[in-house]
Amino acid sequence: AEKAAWKFAEENNIDLVTVIPSLMAGVSPTIDVPSSAFLAMSLITGNEFLINALKGMQMLSGSISISHVEDVCRAHIFVAEKESASGRYNCCAINTSVPELAKFLSKRNPQYNIPTEFGDFPSKAKLIVSFEKLIKEGFSYKYGIEEIYDQCVEYFKFKGILQN
């Protein structure tokens, strides 16, 4: 779809700017919990299928890249309003690995049985998604990993997915 948008923009002399979001987490304004939130929270919920999907994401892309949904929305508005913006912008607040994320979540949420041993699975991110272009334009992220996951835990409790 993005390729078609770039082709259309070029053929019609339209300036196009795109924001490529990473795995989005945080409180959603939708009634249903988005699948991306379930994926981001899989280490806490213990959903083995989604934990394996998270591992697959790391194996394919080299890291687990995460942003708060509000920061992704803010990034879209930011580049749309910024005259100097052009091309593609990666929106990624955090680059991590499954084992690093699990250790962080386990320390921050000891009440949940979060797996922290992953055998020979790569413990460090091999590649990181660069958010440098967006930052150089003047964008700043509002949410770090602590805020993203604290909100997600509270959101999942509110939705009845996690126990208090």
Image (cartoon, rainbow, N blue to C red):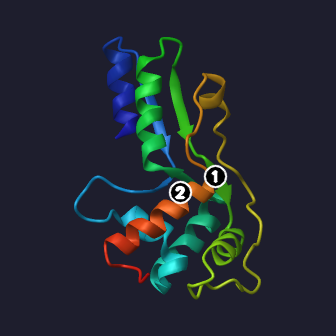
C-alpha span from label 1 to label 2: 10 Å
- The kind of residue on which mark 1 rests is Ile
Q: Residue at x 22, y 61 (%)?
A: 31
Residue at image position (40%, 35%) is 3
| Quarter of the figure with the C terminus | bottom left
Q: Name the one closer to the observer, 24 or 156.
A: 156
Residue 4 at what x, y percent from top left? 34, 34
Q: Which residue is located at x 46 percent, y 84 percent? A: 47
Q: Which residue is tagged 1?
A: 94
**Residue 95, position in %: x, y?**
66, 54
For residue 120, side relative to residue 112 (left or right) = right
Q: Evaluate if marks 1 and 2 touch, with contact meaning CB atoms under 8 Å apart.
A: yes
56 to the left or right of 76: right
Residue type pointed to by label 2: Ile
- In depth, the one of 97 and 163 nearer the eye is 163
**Location of residue 118 (image quadrant):** bottom right
| Mark 2 crowdedness (10 Å alpha carbons): few <14, some 14-19, many ≥20 | many
The number of discs equals 2
Residue under pointer 2: 148
Q: Which tag, 1 or 2, sits closer to the chain's start?
A: 1
Dot 2 lies on which element?
helix
